[in-house]
Amino acid sequence: MPLITETKDFVCSVCGASSEHTIITETDPPKDAPDLDLRPAEPHRSYMRYWVMQCPGCGYCNAMLDMPADIDRDYLSSEEYLSFGGISGVSGKPAEMIKKALICLKGHDYREALQTYVYAAWLLDDEKLDEQAAACRKAAVRIYDEHPVTFRKDPNFSVLIADLLRRSGEFSRVVRDYEGQAYPSRVMTSIAFFEVNLAAKGDRDAHRADEVPGITAI
């Protein structure tokens, strides 16, 4: 099944402006294994431009503009928001994704904020903006470190953090925190071991989950 999209009107939950945006209604599932940070394979890999919207009236960004936000409108004109949290040299969809992450962070939705920074990093990877992508991964790790209660019961985030650290060049922490680490599932333990081996070699490239010995797909 090819990608099917639909253009719809959305009313901004912050300022009430109406604007048209394209959403995905149907698509094929990914054909191959995801990356270690769970970035999906094609065809979903190319669909991220549909994952965030920006209101042309006030600049509010979210997955859907009619989703309520736990912010006041003044935040949308703040220095933090307009400077993308200090990550310079970004524009277009990566900038919108970072704004969405900041809004989630202000609303104390730490899981969504972390994941949205990861999405922003993927978009920046595609634009070959390695420094900015690393900054987004570091921002995601910072959320994880600063809000341990939110994440400590979900080992999936721990394994994700290993990849974010490695991809942003924090090799020594990957080795220190993950060497010998055991997880509830064999798959997660194998991925952590693989991340440690990559970090020990100074490898910060993207790798697919099916590169991990003993794993064929996730």
Image (cartoon, helix red, strand yellow):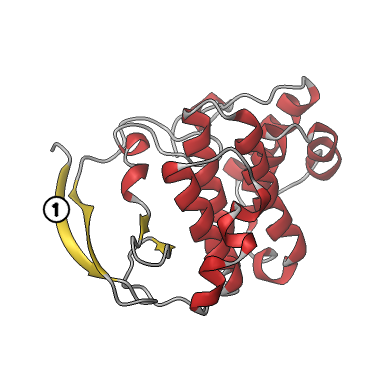
Q: Residue drawn at (57%, 29%), measured in percent from left and top? A: 129
| Whole-percent x, y for residue 127 in the image | 48, 28
**Callout 1: 10 Å neighbours few (<14), some, many (20+)?**
few
Side of 197 where 114 appears, left or right: left
Side of 177 where 142 appears, left or right: left
Q: Secondary structure at mark 1?
A: strand
Residue 10 versus residue 32 in the image, above or below: below
Q: Residue drawn at (48%, 44%), measured in percent from left and top? A: 94
Quadrant of the snapshot with the C terminus:
top left
| Whole-percent x, y for residue 24 in the image | 22, 50
Residue bearing the label numbered 1: 6
Residue 135 versus residue 71 in the image, above or below: above
Q: Quadrant of residue 65?
A: bottom left
Q: Amino acid at mark 1?
A: Glu
Q: Quadrant of residue 61?
A: bottom left
Depth order, front residue of 218/110? 110
Q: Residue drawn at (62%, 46%), measured in percent from left and top? A: 160
Quadrant of the snapshot with the N terminus:
top left
Residue 93 versus residue 55 in the image, above or below: above
Residue 194 versus residue 91 in the image, above or below: above
- Looking at the image, can residue 190 be seen? no
